[in-house]
Amino acid sequence: MKYNPIAEGETVPYFKTTDEKGKTFSSADLMGKKYLLYFYPRDNTPGCIIQACGIKDEMNEFSKKNIIVLGVSGGSFKSHQKFKEKYTLSFPLLMDQDHALAKSFGVWGEKKFMGRTFDGIHRTSFLIGENGLVLKTFLKVKPKLHTSLILEYIQSR
Protein backbone atom coordinates (compact mmCIF):
# COMPACT_ATOMS: atom_id res chain seq x y z
CA MET A 1 0.00 0.00 0.00
CA LYS A 2 1.27 3.46 -0.86
CA TYR A 3 1.35 6.48 1.46
CA ASN A 4 -1.42 8.67 0.04
CA PRO A 5 -3.07 10.83 2.74
CA ILE A 6 -6.52 12.25 2.18
CA ALA A 7 -6.33 15.82 0.93
CA GLU A 8 -7.31 19.11 2.47
CA GLY A 9 -10.94 19.87 1.68
CA GLU A 10 -11.93 16.18 1.58
CA THR A 11 -14.53 14.69 3.89
CA VAL A 12 -13.11 12.54 6.65
CA PRO A 13 -13.83 8.84 6.04
CA TYR A 14 -16.29 7.29 8.47
CA PHE A 15 -14.57 5.68 11.43
CA LYS A 16 -15.55 4.17 14.74
CA THR A 17 -13.04 2.98 17.30
CA THR A 18 -12.28 3.08 21.02
CA ASP A 19 -9.63 4.72 23.12
CA GLU A 20 -7.38 3.21 25.77
CA LYS A 21 -10.26 3.32 28.28
CA GLY A 22 -12.77 1.62 25.98
CA LYS A 23 -14.67 4.85 25.21
CA THR A 24 -16.09 4.89 21.67
CA PHE A 25 -15.18 7.64 19.21
CA SER A 26 -16.62 8.00 15.72
CA SER A 27 -16.42 10.55 12.95
CA ALA A 28 -20.22 10.92 13.25
CA ASP A 29 -19.96 11.75 16.98
CA LEU A 30 -17.24 14.31 16.24
CA MET A 31 -19.36 16.24 13.72
CA GLY A 32 -19.81 19.80 14.97
CA LYS A 33 -16.41 19.71 16.69
CA LYS A 34 -12.95 20.67 15.52
CA TYR A 35 -10.30 18.04 16.17
CA LEU A 36 -6.72 17.06 15.51
CA LEU A 37 -6.31 13.43 14.50
CA TYR A 38 -2.63 12.64 14.73
CA PHE A 39 -1.20 9.33 13.58
CA TYR A 40 2.01 8.13 15.20
CA PRO A 41 3.95 4.91 14.57
CA ARG A 42 4.27 3.34 18.03
CA ASP A 43 3.72 3.86 21.74
CA ASN A 44 6.81 4.45 23.89
CA THR A 45 9.30 5.02 21.08
CA PRO A 46 11.61 8.06 21.10
CA GLY A 47 9.98 10.07 18.30
CA CYS A 48 6.47 9.27 19.46
CA ILE A 49 7.29 10.31 23.03
CA ILE A 50 8.62 13.66 21.78
CA GLN A 51 5.54 14.15 19.62
CA ALA A 52 3.00 13.20 22.32
CA CYS A 53 4.70 15.26 25.04
CA GLY A 54 4.93 18.24 22.68
CA ILE A 55 1.17 18.13 22.27
CA LYS A 56 0.61 17.55 26.00
CA ASP A 57 2.69 20.61 26.85
CA GLU A 58 0.51 22.80 24.61
CA MET A 59 -2.95 21.42 25.43
CA ASN A 60 -4.04 24.84 26.75
CA GLU A 61 -3.46 26.30 23.28
CA PHE A 62 -5.54 23.56 21.65
CA SER A 63 -8.27 24.06 24.27
CA LYS A 64 -8.36 27.83 23.63
CA LYS A 65 -9.19 27.07 20.00
CA ASN A 66 -11.72 24.36 21.02
CA ILE A 67 -9.68 21.65 19.31
CA ILE A 68 -10.00 18.09 20.58
CA VAL A 69 -6.75 16.10 20.26
CA LEU A 70 -6.86 12.40 19.38
CA GLY A 71 -3.75 10.25 18.92
CA VAL A 72 -3.93 7.10 16.75
CA SER A 73 -1.59 4.13 16.44
CA GLY A 74 -1.74 0.37 16.17
CA GLY A 75 -0.86 -0.29 19.80
CA SER A 76 -2.89 -2.49 22.15
CA PHE A 77 -5.12 -1.23 24.97
CA LYS A 78 -2.37 -2.09 27.44
CA SER A 79 0.33 -0.37 25.39
CA HIS A 80 -1.79 2.79 25.00
CA GLN A 81 -2.65 2.78 28.72
CA LYS A 82 1.00 2.47 29.75
CA PHE A 83 2.09 5.18 27.29
CA LYS A 84 -0.62 7.57 28.45
CA GLU A 85 0.07 6.90 32.13
CA LYS A 86 3.87 7.09 31.90
CA TYR A 87 3.83 10.47 30.14
CA THR A 88 0.62 11.82 31.77
CA LEU A 89 -1.01 12.42 28.41
CA SER A 90 -4.31 14.25 28.76
CA PHE A 91 -5.85 13.25 25.42
CA PRO A 92 -7.31 9.95 24.16
CA LEU A 93 -5.21 7.41 22.25
CA LEU A 94 -7.39 5.65 19.71
CA MET A 95 -7.10 1.98 18.88
CA ASP A 96 -6.16 0.94 15.33
CA GLN A 97 -4.70 -2.55 15.71
CA ASP A 98 -5.95 -3.67 12.30
CA HIS A 99 -4.69 -0.41 10.74
CA ALA A 100 -8.12 0.21 9.17
CA LEU A 101 -8.18 3.83 10.35
CA ALA A 102 -4.64 4.51 9.12
CA LYS A 103 -5.46 2.90 5.77
CA SER A 104 -8.70 4.88 5.36
CA PHE A 105 -6.77 8.12 5.94
CA GLY A 106 -4.03 6.97 3.54
CA VAL A 107 -1.24 7.07 6.13
CA TRP A 108 -0.44 3.35 6.16
CA GLY A 109 2.20 2.36 3.65
CA GLU A 110 5.73 1.34 2.83
CA LYS A 111 8.41 2.92 5.00
CA LYS A 112 12.17 2.72 5.19
CA PHE A 113 13.94 2.90 8.52
CA MET A 114 17.44 1.85 9.49
CA GLY A 115 17.96 -0.04 6.24
CA ARG A 116 14.68 -1.95 6.47
CA THR A 117 11.58 -1.63 4.31
CA PHE A 118 8.23 -2.41 5.92
CA ASP A 119 4.60 -1.26 6.07
CA GLY A 120 3.68 1.10 8.87
CA ILE A 121 2.06 4.36 9.90
CA HIS A 122 3.54 7.52 8.44
CA ARG A 123 3.61 10.30 11.04
CA THR A 124 0.80 12.49 9.69
CA SER A 125 -1.78 14.76 11.32
CA PHE A 126 -5.13 16.06 10.17
CA LEU A 127 -6.89 19.14 11.49
CA ILE A 128 -10.58 18.49 10.91
CA GLY A 129 -13.31 21.13 10.94
CA GLU A 130 -16.76 21.06 12.49
CA ASN A 131 -18.20 20.09 9.09
CA GLY A 132 -16.06 16.94 8.87
CA LEU A 133 -13.74 18.35 6.20
CA VAL A 134 -9.95 18.23 6.45
CA LEU A 135 -8.80 21.81 7.08
CA LYS A 136 -5.09 21.08 7.07
CA THR A 137 -2.88 18.04 6.58
CA PHE A 138 0.55 17.93 8.21
CA LEU A 139 2.57 15.44 6.16
CA LYS A 140 5.42 13.28 7.49
CA VAL A 141 6.11 15.71 10.30
CA LYS A 142 9.25 15.59 12.41
CA PRO A 143 8.39 14.88 16.08
CA LYS A 144 10.17 17.99 17.44
CA LEU A 145 8.43 20.29 14.94
CA HIS A 146 4.97 18.69 14.99
CA THR A 147 3.26 20.78 17.67
CA SER A 148 4.81 24.10 16.65
CA LEU A 149 3.71 23.62 13.01
CA ILE A 150 0.14 22.91 14.10
CA LEU A 151 0.01 25.80 16.57
CA GLU A 152 1.46 28.17 13.99
CA TYR A 153 -1.32 27.16 11.61
CA ILE A 154 -4.22 27.37 14.09
CA GLN A 155 -3.04 30.66 15.58
CA SER A 156 -2.94 32.23 12.12
CA ARG A 157 -6.67 31.49 11.66
Image (cartoon, helix red, strand yellow):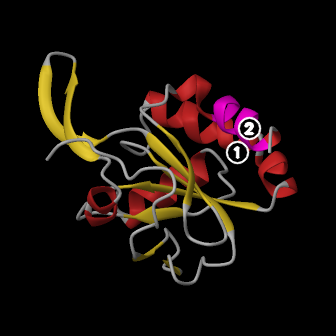
Quick one: label 1, few (<14), some, or many (20+) residues within 10 Å?
some
The residue under the point 68% across, 78% down is: 32
Q: Is residue 134 left or right of residue 33?
A: left
Q: Position of residue 91 (x, y in %)?
A: 64, 59
Q: Position of residue 122 (x, y in %)?
A: 34, 39
Say if the magenta span includes residue 53.
no
Residue that numbered label 2 is attached to: 151
The residue under the point 57% across, 83% down is: 29
Q: Position of residue 75 (x, y in %)?
A: 35, 56
Residue type of the residue flagged with mark 1:
Lys
**In the structure shown, which secondary structural element does the residue marked by tag 1 occupy?**
helix
Count of numbered tags: 2
Using the image, determine if residue 51 lies above or below residue 81: above
The residue under the point 41% across, 38% down is: 123
Say if the magenta span includes residue 152.
yes
Residue type of the residue flagged with mark 2:
Leu
As drawn, the label of residue 13 is none
**Figure quadrant of residue 69:** bottom right
Per the picture, the main secondary structure of the magenta-coloured stretch is: helix
Q: Nearer the viewer, residue 50 or 27?
A: 27
Tell me the quarter of the image containing the C terminus. Answer: top right
